[in-house]
Image (cartoon, grey):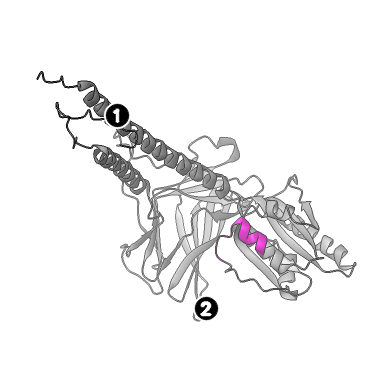
């Protein structure tokens, strides 16, 4: 009997089928992986877009709110939360009047004009009835515009005065509108907010890590022990005006460091002054109470001109800890054009309850957050390696060895699509 020739075509088809199946599964896995990273990028971009629309919201009603707010006042509130909160606070027929600023941040409520608050009328409303204040709400104007019986009043932002006068004039406009509405003897709700924040308009400058070429002065910054109550050091102080916003700025060299002790029983308050004779002076206050301390009320003098400033970073500490910030801290003027800007680089400061000898700081609290760029880069590389390893394991699991062999004397092997 002549043996039958081995049909190698079936074996080749079987191997070809296995390769096609493996390629198909790998392509499906890569498509899913690509879709995952695409969605991740989209979510990140959406968060970046809406991060800038978080603004404070002040709410006041003629009578008590129908349902007290259940939201904590110091958390970030999203659109859906704010929408449901408005629905629960107002009554069905209440008119909602929204006063909309172009730019507003929680720091603006600390504004003062002629030793009074720029929002004296809003403060009076707080004492007459219930009110709510949320420091960070996502796009509140868009949420309110989607409601019924809502009137939006856009406050004029073209007044050519300081920002303090601008906010004070808007406060008067709100009072006049409230007086008009109260004559109708109907309940209404007042909302004061903005479209964009005012504090995030200035970019943060990168601190260069390039090695020095030896032409600059490498002196260690001097530590100043001001009246033995405050330790202060910094690398430099620069002044930026509107006309030189793209330039390095004018370097301020303080010549005198003074301290005025305004403390009372149970409360420490120091007024610190850094002055360059005849040109510039920077003043701020340090308050100490219940184991905490913080710096506030920044004032900058350029000749005879006075500017109220706000810090881009909260300067504060606990107990015997000092505050340290290697990136530049910006003191931004509370004016309409947000200039001048005073930049302090490598600031470290620490106040003391009692007189302190020497110039040694305590342990420092740094202004840089925990999630730094190197940590984020490490996490990204880790996820990429994990994805590559998962892809490799998937490919290896799809490989299958042959478990059937063709017998020359037997029936021809056929491979179906399901196998």
Q: In the image, what residue occupies the spot 16% across and 22% down?
A: 6
Q: Label 1: how many residues lie within 10 Å, few (<14), some (14-19) or many (20+)? A: some
Q: Is residue 67 visible?
A: yes
Instruction: Give the position of the N terminus as an image quadrant.
Output: top left
In this picture, which residue range is highlighted in magenta? 74-84
Q: Position of residue 26 (x, y in %)?
A: 33, 35
Q: Is-magenta flag for residue 83?
A: yes
Q: Position of residue 119 (x, y in %)?
A: 71, 63
Check the image and report above or below for 126 versus 170. Answer: below
Marks 2 and 1, Cα distance to the nearest angstrom?
Answer: 87 Å
Quick one: 262 or 129, which is closer to the camera? 129
**SS category of the residue bearing label 2:** loop
Residue highlighted by disc 1: 17
Check the image and report above or below for 132 versus 370. Answer: below
Residue highlighted by disc 2: 264
Image check: 115 left or right of 298?
right
Q: Which label was assigned to residue 187?
A: none
Q: In the image, what residue occupies the spot 66% across and 65% down?
A: 85
Outermost residue, bottom side: 265
Q: Position of residue 183 (x, y in %)?
A: 90, 67
Image check: 7 left or right of 32?
left
Q: Label 2: how many residues lie within 10 Å, few (<14), some (14-19) or many (20+)? A: few
**SS category of the residue bearing label 1:** helix
Which label's residue is closer to the chain start, 2 or 1?
1
Quick one: 61 or 297, which is closer to the camera? 61
Which quadrant of the figure has residue 150?
A: bottom right
Q: Position of residue 343 (x, y in %)?
A: 48, 47
Q: Is residue 57 visible?
A: no
Image check: 317 left or right of 2?
right
Check the image and report above or below for 19 versus 277. Answer: above
Q: In the image, what residue occupies the spot 61% across and 47% down?
A: 338
């Amino acid at each position: 009997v002549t043996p039958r020739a081995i049909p190698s075509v079936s074996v080749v088809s079987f191997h070809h089928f296995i390769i096609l199946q493996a390629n198909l599964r790998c392509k499906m896995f890569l498509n899913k992986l690509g879709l995952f990273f695409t969605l991740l990028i989209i979510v990140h971009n959406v968060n970046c877009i809406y991060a800038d629309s978080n603004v404070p919201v002040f709410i006041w009603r003629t009578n008590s709110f129908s349902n007290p707010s259940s939201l904590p006042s110091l958390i970030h509130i999203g659109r859906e939360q704010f929408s449901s909160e408005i629905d629960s606070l107002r009554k069905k027929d209440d008119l909602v009047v929204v006063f909309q600023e172009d730019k507003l941040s929680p720091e603006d409520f600390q504004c003062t004009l002629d030793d009074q608050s720029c929002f004296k009328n809003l403060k009076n409303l707080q004492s007459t009835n219930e009110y709510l204040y949320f420091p960070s709400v996502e796009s509140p104007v868009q949420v309110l515009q989607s409601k019924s019986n809502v009137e939006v009043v856009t406050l004029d932002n073209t007044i050519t005065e300081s920002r303090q006068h601008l906010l004070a004039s808007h406060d008067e406009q709100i009072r006049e509108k409230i007086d008009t509405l109260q004559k109708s003897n109907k309940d209404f709700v007042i909302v004061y907010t903005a479209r964009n924040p005012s504090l995030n308009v200035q970019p943060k400058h990168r601190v260069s890590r390039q090695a020095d070429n030896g032409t600059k002065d490498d002196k260690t910054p001097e530590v100043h022990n001001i009246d033995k109550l405050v330790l202060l050091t910094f690398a430099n102080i620069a002044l930026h005006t509107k006309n030189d916003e793209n330039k390095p700025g004018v370097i301020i060299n303080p010549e005198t460091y003074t301290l005025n002790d305004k403390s009372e029983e149970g409360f420490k308050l120091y007024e610190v002054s850094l002055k360059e004779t005849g040109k510039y002076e920077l003043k701020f206050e340090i308050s100490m109470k219940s184991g905490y301390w913080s710096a506030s009320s920044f004032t900058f003098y350029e000749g005879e001109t006075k500017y109220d400033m706000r810090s881009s970073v909260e300067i504060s500490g606990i107990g015997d800890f000092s505050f340290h910030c290697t990136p530049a801290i910006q003191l931004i003027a509370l004016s309409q054009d947000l200039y001048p800007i005073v930049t302090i680089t490598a600031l470290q400061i620490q106040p003391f309850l009692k007189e302190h000898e020497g110039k040694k700081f305590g342990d420092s609290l740094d202004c840089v957050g925990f999630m730094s760029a190197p940590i984020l880069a490490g996490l990204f590389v880790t996820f990429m390696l994990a994805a590559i390893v998962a892809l490799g394991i998937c490919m290896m699991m799809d490989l299958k060895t042959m478990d059937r062999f063709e017998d020359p004397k037997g029936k021809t092997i056929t491979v179906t699509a399901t196998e």
